Image: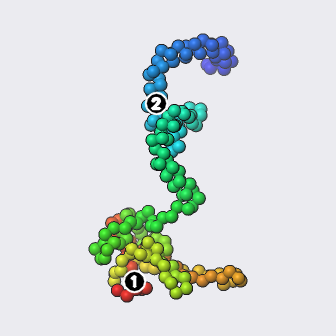
């Protein structure tokens, strides 16, 4: 049976001797231990070059030499990753297209929008057009989607006003692109043009 007091007494009594053992083992195998640490640390670095401990009491340890070497070799990559991370964190990362869409050569005309994964009918893909006054602005969704007489997407109109707020009135329209059919990955997205003559 485990005796806590006995173990504590033994631990304190043998502490100096165990330190001697540890120092002797380290001196005998110093080169091997340092090489093992360097090899392990190179495989476990984060974006800032800090060495992460996978197991143990502390969540992280730092190795200044490896930090500096890693940072010097990957400085541009580290700064770019940090910039993207913080922009995403505060919601400043601009994404012209949803992750499920891409732009590729079209058999209809020039470039078109293509699905990278299966999408169900009624999927809202985001804003495609915006009308302020008499001017219509196209987003990448509206700019690259091609016309078809048998489309698989439709534009849903949303009218935005705040006529109840005096002194700060605005009025504009926007259209969201919504799938009208089930779309398979690799299939081109199309709509029926209403703003332009085809």
Tag 2 and tag 1, C-beta contact below 8 Å: no
What whole-number distance in Å separates the C-alpha atoms at marks 2 and 1?
61 Å
The foreground one among 21 and 27 is 27
| Location of residue 188 with respect to 149 vertically, above or below | above
Secondary structure at badge 1 equals loop
Residue 84 % position (x, y): 51, 55
| Relative to 155, 150 lies left or right | left
Q: Earlier in the sequence, mark 2 or mark 1?
A: 2
Q: Which residue is mark 2?
A: 38
Looking at the image, the residue that sits furthest to the front is 72
Residue 93 % position (x, y): 52, 61
Secondary structure at badge 2 equals helix
Figure label count: 2
Looking at the image, the residue that sits furthest to the left is 107
In the rendered image, which quarter contains the C terminus?
bottom left
Determine the residue positioned at 44% across, 26% down: 35
Determine the residue positioned at 51% across, 32% down: 65
Category of crowding for the residue at label 1, using alpha-carbon neighbours closer than 10 angstroms: few (below 14), some (14–19), many (at least 20): some
Determine the residue positioned at 43% across, 76% down: 142
Q: Which residue is mark 1?
A: 193
Camera-near label (2 vs 1) is: 2
Q: Is residue 154 visible?
A: yes
| Location of residue 142 with respect to 30 vertically, above or below | below
Looking at the image, the residue that sits furthest to the right is 166
Q: Is residue 184 visible?
A: no
| Location of residue 81 with respect to 26 vertically, above or below | below
Residue 95 % position (x, y): 48, 64
Residue 119 % position (x, y): 40, 67
Determine the residue positioned at 46% across, 70% down: 125
In the rendered image, which quarter contains the N terminus?
top right
């Amino acid at each position: 049976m485990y005796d806590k007091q006995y173990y504590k007494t033994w631990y304190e009594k043998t502490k100096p001797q165990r330190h001697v053992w540890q120092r002797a083992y380290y001196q005998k195998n110093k080169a091997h231990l340092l090489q093992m640490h360097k090899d392990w640390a190179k495989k476990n670095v984060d974006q800032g070059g800090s060495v992460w401990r996978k197991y143990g009491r502390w969540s992280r340890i730092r190795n200044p030499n490896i930090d500096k070497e890693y940072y010097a070799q990957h400085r541009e990559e580290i700064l770019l990753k940090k910039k993207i991370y913080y922009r995403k964190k505060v919601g400043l990362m601009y994404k012209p297209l949803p992750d499920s869409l891409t732009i590729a050569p079209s058999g209809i005309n020039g470039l078109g929008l293509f699905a990278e994964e299966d999408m169900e009918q009624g999927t809202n893909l985001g804003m495609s057009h915006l009308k302020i006054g008499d001017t219509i602005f196209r987003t990448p969704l509206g700019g690259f989607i091609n016309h078809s007489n048998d489309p698989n997407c439709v534009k849903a109109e949303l009218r935005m006003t705040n006529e109840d707020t005096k002194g700060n009135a605005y009025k504009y329209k926007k259209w969201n692109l919504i799938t009208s059919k089930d779309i398979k990955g690799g299939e081109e997205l199309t709509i029926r043009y209403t703003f332009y003559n085809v």
